[in-house]
Image (tube, coloured by chain):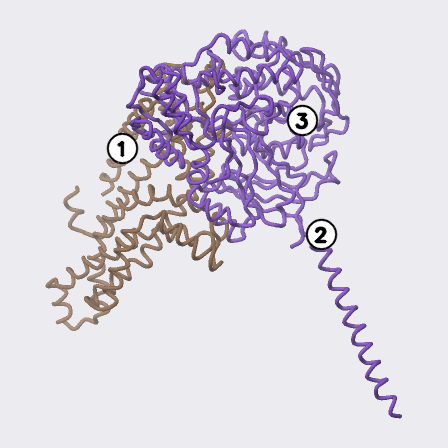
Chain colours: A brown, B purple
Amino acid sequence: MAAYIVRRVVWTVPVVLLVIFMTFMLMKQIEGNPFRKTERAVPAAVQKNLERKFNLDKPWYVQYTQYVKGVATGDLGPSLVLRDRTVNDIVKEQFPRSIELGLYAFGWAVLLGVPAGVIAALKPNSRFDYGAMLFSNVGFALPNFLVATLLIYFVSVKWGVLPTSGWTTWQHKILPSFTLGLVPMAYFARLVRGTMLETLQADYVRTAKAKGLRWRRVVGVHVLRNSLIPVVTAAAPLLGYIITGSFIVENIFAVPGIGRYYVTAVSARDYSVVMGLTVLLSIIVIAANLLVDILYGILDPRTREART
Amino acid sequence: MRLRVPLLIAAAVVVAVALVAAGCGGGGDKKGAAGDGKQAASQVLKMAWGAEPPSLDPGLATDTTSSNVLLNIMDPLVRLGDDLQPVPALAESWDIDGKAVTFHLRDDGRWTNGDPVTAHDFEYSWKRTLDPKLAADYAYQLYGIVGAEAYNNAKPAQAAALRDTVGVKALDDRTLQVTLTSAQPWFVQQMAHHSFLAVHKATVEKYGTKWTEARNIVTNGAFKLAGWKHDASITLVKNADWRNADEVALDRVEGRIIVDGTTRVQAFEAGEVDTLDGAGLPPADMPRLKQLPEYEKYPALGTYYYGFNLKNITDLNQRRAMAFAIDRQAIIDNVAQADQIPATGMVPQGMPGFDVIKQDFLPTRADLEKAREFMDKAENPKRKITLFHNDAPGHKEIAVAVQAMWKELGIDVTIKAQEWAQYLEFLGPPPSDAVYVYRLGWIGDYVDPMNFLELWTSKSGNNNTRFASPAYDRLIAQARNTADDEARYELYRQAEAMLTGPQGELPISPIYWYTYTNLERESVKDTFKINLLDQFDLSKVVIKEA
């Protein structure tokens, strides 16, 4: 297991280098002047000064090597648009909030989605089952910006129960994390219900019941553990959803995370921010996948043998 | 005995009436006092900013949010009065002698660390903005000063030598002498722009790029930057040591940064903020918001226009036909919906000199009859054209409306949307050959028609039409050197006529003049004002009692 982990960590380096290279090339292909923010043309002297300051007047391979060197030393470069801040500043200050948002969203998904799926599976075709699956379908179908705006309208403006936007007190954090957690919630509910229904048919469950084990123990220890394996597998791609969904949710709820700025940075052609955040997010996705694989190994002994 | 009962009753009635009268009178007085705008006990303004300021360094800031924060925490040399003429601020007076402008500073300007504000601060700051090493986006705002463009254009090796050739010099602590490249009668008004603010040298040198953080920044204006949580909030507190502090009513301004337009409106309607910053209301909500008592609109110095690529739409009569077929008022009423003003020229209403400059040629409503006449006269009309616009909200709807209007002339319009940065590259100049018509707007930098008319000179980087007229260039050059307002406005009138007059070339068809729309609660509506340059002065805001 340890060798496996080390190998995976070592593989991260070439993957990240590839990500940097591809992002770098893509950004260079997109036309657009990062220094022209409005319709005003940028005078030649000003353009020259800006390109010199940000090393954009050097050939692309020089820029690329300088950037990679920077990443290796942990310096993600200055922002081309937010002139007083570096990418490191932005990440240090704002990234924790995005992580918090993502974790809370995931928390909602686990707290509401998993139990909903479990109960739906234990009482198939009941009113609860239909209700939970209806909720799940709606959660998938509604785009998160629509849910966000509706929630703000009803909960904040009409009823005045929670604030409309921001990220300061715990009341501020409820609506954005719930909105972001809606799709994972829906997904988990369905997934857990499906795998549990399957597992409940298995022979060993019937054996356990025949042996006289308490139903609660059968479900809680044997069935649940096996049903959660697909959930763990699903968690990694869901991370992708949470990352991209956070762009919209952060924008609408005015959450000062990096997601919102990531999208505007592309339109603004803020090369260093786009590259820095892409590198960061790819490292996170790689780490999350590794974590999932380790968890998988713990949960399912069969895979442990296959790997070494 | 019998008489006493009626007497008692009469006495009771008199007493009752007297009490009621006293009660009424007292209540009426109290109501009157509150309704007359008594100041609320708590002078804390809660507002929403529409964007995170990319930089609070006057040398680096380019956008409206940064500009508004800066103009409230710093003291400019002049401010713009209600009539858009310069009003003394940090400069108590100035002398203009041809190309030389001398500012005399007040002696009570103070930085928040106690240092006095001197002319040396301004000389240092302006030269810093022009330093090629700083790579200031708005360095060109200072190009009217002798030596400025050369210094900004210099290679790093030669830059240091050119620094002192820039025509700004502090003769002493209170006298700032500026030498201009030409008369530029609008120069003093330009001083109201944030690019001309002074920065505190020692702070800048000590903290480098971090000098604008709230914990480091040193300012000299009516408010202090008490807190700046990036992307989240901006907090201003009254600067008790400011030269005019006793005229400032607000104690604190708590600003939340909310980028999404709909969320901003929802925060206002939920009572979380009392005013927005004029950053714009979502077009889809406009019909509803316009009915609110809190809705406010302000004229803006800005023109929304459609430009023609003269290489493709070569026939002047076709351009005239297309300009006459556009129903500007209908677009404003049904599509744009922010009470804009139909534009019949490039120079917007509200600009000094407008009454002299404005042309009577283009109509505010569609004139299809005349349009068809022009179209018939056109020798080589292009009947299949492409109309480009950037993909921000609102532009597509206007394009679709204009498409229908031009269909009446037998012109088939294909509408293409592009992402902003790519769109700008596409427009050049020179514009791509695929462009027949494009959409753009121009918001004024300073209050003089020159800012709008110089765009159409042949070498202008903002002229995407391929319009090139030596006569026009000469007019503009002449106007630059004409100090007398009346004479200059006459030259402007001729220039505007060359664009949108009856004999004009019509490289553009203006659509409307912008407005700034805002939501302001009754308690601040009277004193919170946005001027034509999208600036608002928080030192004048007073929160009324409800």
The residue tagged 2 is B36
Q: Chain of mark 2?
A: B
Chain ID of residue with mark 3: B
Please report the residue visible at 23 percent of the width from the left and 67 percent of the height from the top.
Answer: A217
Horizontal and vertical percent position of residue A186: 28, 55
Decide if residue B490 is on the left or right side of residue B338. Answer: right
Task: Tell me what residue is drawn at x 48 percent, y 20 percent.
Answer: B500
Determine crowd level at label 1: few under 14, some 14-19, many 20+ residues with C-alpha closer than 10 A: few
| A166 left or right of A137 in image | right
Q: Tell me the quadrant of the picture where the N terminus of chain A can be found.
A: top left
Residue under circle 1?
A10
Q: Nearer the viewer, residue B160 or B475?
A: B475
Q: Give the alpha-carbon distance from disc 1 to disc 2, as whole Å.
A: 74 Å
Single out the mark in the foreground, 1 or 2.
Answer: 2
Q: For the residue marked with disc 2, what is the amino acid?
A: Asp
In this rendering, which labeled residue sits more in front, label 3 or label 1?
3
Q: Secondary structure at mark 3?
A: loop
Q: What residue does disc 3 label?
A: B85
The answer as to whether the residues below labels 3 and 1 share one chain is no
**Residue toward you, B293 or B536:** B293
Residue drawn at point x = 42 percent, y = 31 percent: B366
User: Does the CB distance between marks 3 and 1 fall below 8 Å?
Assistant: no
